[in-house]
Amino acid sequence: METEAIVLCRIGPSSKAFEKRIVQLPDLLSDEVRIESEAFGLNYADVMARNGLYKEAPPLPCVLGYELVGIVKEVGINCPKEWIGKRVLAFSRFGGYAKLVQTKVNAIVEIDDLPAEIAMSLSTQGVTAYYMSDFISPIRKNEHVLIHAAAGGVGSLLIQLAKRKGAIVYAKIGSEEKRELALNLGADHVINYKTSDYQAELKKLLGTHLLSASFNPVAGDTIKKDMQFLGPNGRLFLFGGSQMVGGKFGIFSKLKFLFDMGLILPIALMMRSKSLIGVNMLKIADAHPEIIANCLNEVTELYRKNELTTHVGGVYELDQINEAHYFLESGKSMGKITVRWT
């Protein structure tokens, strides 16, 4: 079966990277559903893939995308037929930038009339935030927590999930426009790393306290800085490498990025009772799809109970995919970026 898709054809700036093409879908597997998409979401991993910095991405040309909202049109022989006709939020292992998308039946949740741009903020970004804050190593009351990129899709949800547990939240942002959002979501302290040294500012705000957790999608030299503030039982969650984007010197920029992270010895972590937790939801989805399904259902339920809110950072039309990618890469976006097919 054929479908329209936004195809990543070349590495580089968004204005030259994508083309709208007809692509061939494989046969539907027994545990898969086929969804007619109304909209899909963007994630920073898409930006990394477009820049050739995400090794998990398929070889070019390929269709990116981890999430979509649409109507189930067909189901595999081992899937309940009751799914046909239902409007769902779905995870996809790439392929989300297509009009027809195939994914596992355990990677969807019914959403009725929930707006697509809200639903998709609960998908990849919501599941990532919930996995870190509530599943793999839950935040506890009165813990001091640092959240990088706190006004982004994952960060804005992490603020709320941490405050829900009674933590003290330090939100790191990159512009004053993002300060109000972080405070409104519940952050106790906001640090603009563009106008102050976040290391010095965090030290002053912490006083005699140490961090219990840092949620870091930046990497680079922020790893060494964060590790200095972690106390016993401190966890550093590394779930991205945005500092690598924009390097102007090819392999030398990548080597500097790795060098800046420093050498972390397992014996040193043990002696200080600190943890470095790498998070790649694509790997979790491959090995433990039931975890993804659990986290997706939990975060959706929190939204339905008004215990979690989302921030819509922008809704773009299909022919604005270049602008949407550029905006996300710029670091100026807040919350979730969505692209509509209709």
Image: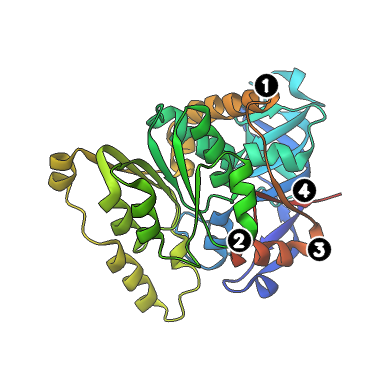
Q: Mark yes or no: residue 139 visible.
A: yes
Q: Earlier in the sequence, mark 1 or mark 3?
A: 1
Name which of mark 2 and mark 3 comes first in the sequence.
Answer: 2
SS label for mark 2: helix
Front residue of 176 and 296: 176
Question: Tag 3, which secondary structure?
Answer: helix
User: Is 258 on the left or on the right of 142, as rendered?
Assistant: left
Residue placed at 64% from the left, 42% from the top?
A: 184
Query: Which numbered marker is on residue 176?
Result: 2
Instruction: Give how far across and how far down residue 200 sits, in percent.
Output: 35, 60
In this image, 120 relative to 317: left or right?
left
Disc ID at residue 76: none
Q: Nearer the viewer, mark 4 or mark 2?
A: 2
Q: Earlier in the sequence, mark 2 or mark 1?
A: 2
In this rendered view, identify the residue nearer to me: 26 or 139.
Answer: 139
List the residue tagged with mark 4.
Answer: 99
- Given the image, on which type of amino acid does mark 4 rest? Lys
- Relative to residue 28, is residue 271 drawn left or right? left
Q: CA distance from mark 4 to mark 2?
A: 37 Å
Q: Secondary structure at mark 4?
A: loop
